[in-house]
Structure formats: C-alpha cells, structure tokens
C-alpha cells in the first residue's frame, strides 16, 4: 500500500536561524549536508512518519540518539506524550528550541488512493477533492517542557485533495490512514537487514524485491540472506559474512535494504546512495552540492587567523 507515494512539499515554520522553510520536492532531492540542518529535517520527517506507531516511535528516536522511557509513552487520539532519559543530549540536539512543527504534503500512490475512496465512498467532498488533487497533507507538531525531559506531540490540519478535514468531522478511518502512511517513509540506517531480507524472500509479493536487493550492488558483488547456527540470520556479500567487510560496504547494504526491502517508497539517505536506485522510489540524500535549506552557507572559507581579526 506504500508504493508510489511521494512527498511533494514540506513547510517548516522555524529551522535553525531561518523561518518559514518551504521546499518543493521532486523524484530525487539533493540537500546540502550532512550537517545539523539536514539532520533536523530528517528528524522531523521521521517524527511525522512514526508517531502513530509505538514500535516505530522507539526505533526512530533511538536512531537519532534519544533514549526513550518506554513506560512513558502515552497515546490518545491524534496526540502522543513521550519522555526520555538523556535531556542534556536532547537540548543540544534541538538547539534549545522547544517548539517544532512540520507540514508535509504527500502525493498518494494508487493503492492508498483506492483504499481511501473505498472508505469515503459516501463522502462526495472527499472523492471529488481527490479527483482534483490526489494528495494528503497534515501537520505534525511537538512541544517540549521547560526541562527538555518530555514532549507532547500531535497531528492536525488534515487535508485530502481539496477538502480540508474539520476537527469536528474527522472520519473514523483517518487514524488507519495515518498508520498506513507511516510505512511510506524510511531512513537508511539501523535497519534489521537480515530479518527484512528473509521476510521479502519468503513472501510471494516480495520475492522480486528480494532479487533486486541481491543485485543492487553491482560494483561490490551479490547479496543473499542465510540462516546460521541457532537460527541466526546473516547477510552474505560475495558469500562472505557482511561483518567481514568495512563500514562503507555495510552502509551500502543499509541503503539497499531501505530502497528494496523496507516497503517504503520515500527513503532518506545521509550522503550519496551507494547502491542502484529503483525507479519507484523517491530518494532524499545529502551532498555538498545539494540545495541549501536552513542556514546559508558561506561561499568563502576563512582561515583561522582571518576569523580572529
């Protein structure tokens, strides 16, 4: 259900020292980085595509270094309350900002569109709105307490096609739609590649994706998943354990897993992709020649002595 969906625009009211960031995205997006600004964009995108699934919340926060307290995850409707242990790290990560929000507009893939039309067949406003614009947009907001120890998160400002969904008239299937949308986005790091690979290999619908994953590193060699002692799964690269290779090869496998095994159609990569790219995926990646979003970059690098004058 996640195939062919893509982000067509993001709006961030405040990011670092620039306000009202608007970014119209395309099939492949080159942002300047990796740097603190691009990290915060990746973090915000990850937040808004994870907060409706308790398991994904923990995984996403952990991948950015936040140590969540699992017992303090409270979900109610479109709101979520979370807490963590490492407040000093979080304060520095956020640059002392306590309020964050991001608005995301998504062009829906055919399967998701079909699902929505089936749910909303009696609501002419939604069906007509989606015929004009097959898009879904929403705002994700996060506000931290004064001690940077906990936060309240929420979704709002929903729009399907040309129809803005009023708070008093939210359809009962909107939460299920958010849950499905969660799977559209993936960050290419910290993935359990062997488990993902086996799941796709044993799936009738996913075996083709597994084959593409195996052939996605033409410059490095072929991949496959195997079961070793005690049922443990491992990835082999050229019939050698992946752990025998260096960080670059392991990073390339993470990229391949995000693009071919995760089931997500929108993938964020810190750096340049190290594997072949599928035609169906929208890739966000960071390079020194990418679009500058947030803090402007100086055209001249000053020497240390010049900075002191």
Image: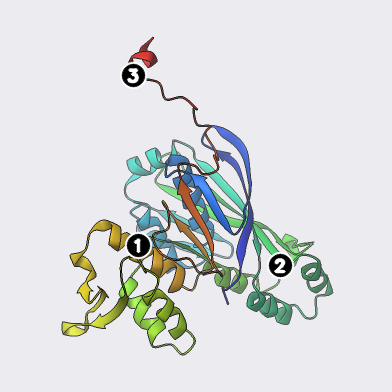
**Chain-order first, disc 1 or disc 3:** 1
Circles 2 and 1, Cβ within 8 Å, touching? The answer is: no
What is the residue that sits farthest to the left in this orientation?
Answer: 229
**Residue 165 location (% of width, % of height):** 74, 63
Q: In which quarter of the image is residue 114?
A: bottom right
**Chain-order first, disc 3 or disc 2:** 2
- Give the residue number, with chain letter if any, for mark 2: 170
Circles 1 and 3, Cβ within 8 Å, touching? The answer is: no
Mark 3 or 2: in front is 3
Give the residue at x 38% y 14%: 306
Nearest to the observer: residue 165 or residue 213: 213
What is the crowding at mark 1: few (fewer than 14 residues within 10 Å), some, or many (at least 20)?
A: some
What is the residue that sits farthest to the front in this orientation?
Answer: 219
Note whether residue 144 is visible. no
- Give the residue number, with chain letter if any, for mark 3: 304
Circles 3 and 2, Cβ within 8 Å, touching? The answer is: no
In the rendered view of the protein, which quadrant contains the N terminus? bottom right
Work out how far the residue at label 3 is from the one at label 2, CA to CA, in angstroms.
57 Å
- Give the residue number, with chain letter if any, for mark 1: 252
**Residue 87 location (% of width, % of height):** 35, 44
What is the residue that sits farthest to the bottom in this orientation?
Answer: 204
Q: In which quarter of the image is residue 219?
A: bottom left
**Residue 113 location (% of width, % of height):** 69, 75
Q: Quadrant of residue 291?
A: top right
Give the residue at x 36% y 78%: 197
Mark 2 or 1: in front is 1
Numbered disc total: 3
Which colouring convention does the figure follow?
rainbow
- Give SS at disc 1: helix
Note whether residue 202 is visible. yes
Work out how far the residue at label 1 is from the one at label 3, CA to CA, in angstroms.
36 Å
């Amino acid at each position: 259900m996640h195939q062919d969906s893509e982000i067509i625009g993001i709006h961030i009211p405040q990011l670092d020292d620039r306000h009202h960031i608007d970014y119209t995205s395309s099939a492949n997006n080159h942002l300047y980085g990796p740097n603190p600004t691009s990290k915060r964009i990746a973090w915000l995108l990850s937040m808004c595509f994870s907060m409706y699934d308790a398991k994904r919340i923990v995984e996403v926060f952990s991948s950015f270094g936040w140590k969540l307290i699992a017992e303090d995850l409270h979900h109610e409707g479109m709101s979520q309350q979370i807490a963590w242990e490492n407040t000093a790290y979080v304060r520095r990560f956020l640059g002392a900002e306590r309020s964050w929000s991001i608005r995301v507009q998504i062009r829906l893939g055919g399967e998701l569109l079909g699902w929505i039309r089936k749910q909303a067949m009696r609501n002419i406003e939604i069906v007509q709105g989606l015929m004009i614009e097959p898009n879904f947009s929403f705002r994700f907001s996060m506000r931290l307490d004064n001690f940077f120890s906990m936060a309240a998160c929420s979704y709002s400002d929903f729009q399907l096609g040309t129809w803005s969904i009023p708070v008093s008239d939210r359809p009962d299937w909107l939460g299920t739609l958010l849950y499905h949308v969660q799977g559209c986005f993936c960050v290419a790091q910290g993935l359990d590649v062997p488990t993902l690979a086996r799941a796709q290999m044993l799936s009738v619908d996913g075996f083709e994706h597994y084959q593409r994953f195996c052939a996605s590193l033409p410059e490095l060699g072929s991949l496959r998943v195997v079961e070793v002692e005690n049922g443990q799964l491992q990835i082999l690269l050229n019939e050698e354990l992946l752990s025998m290779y260096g960080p670059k090869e392991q990073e390339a496998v993470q990229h391949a897993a995000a693009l071919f095994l995760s089931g997500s159609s929108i993938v964020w990569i810190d750096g340049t992709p190290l594997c072949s790219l599928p035609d169906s995926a929208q890739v966000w990646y960071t390079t020194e020649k990418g679009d500058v979003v947030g803090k402007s970059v100086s055209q001249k690098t000053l020497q240390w002595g010049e900075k002191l004058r």
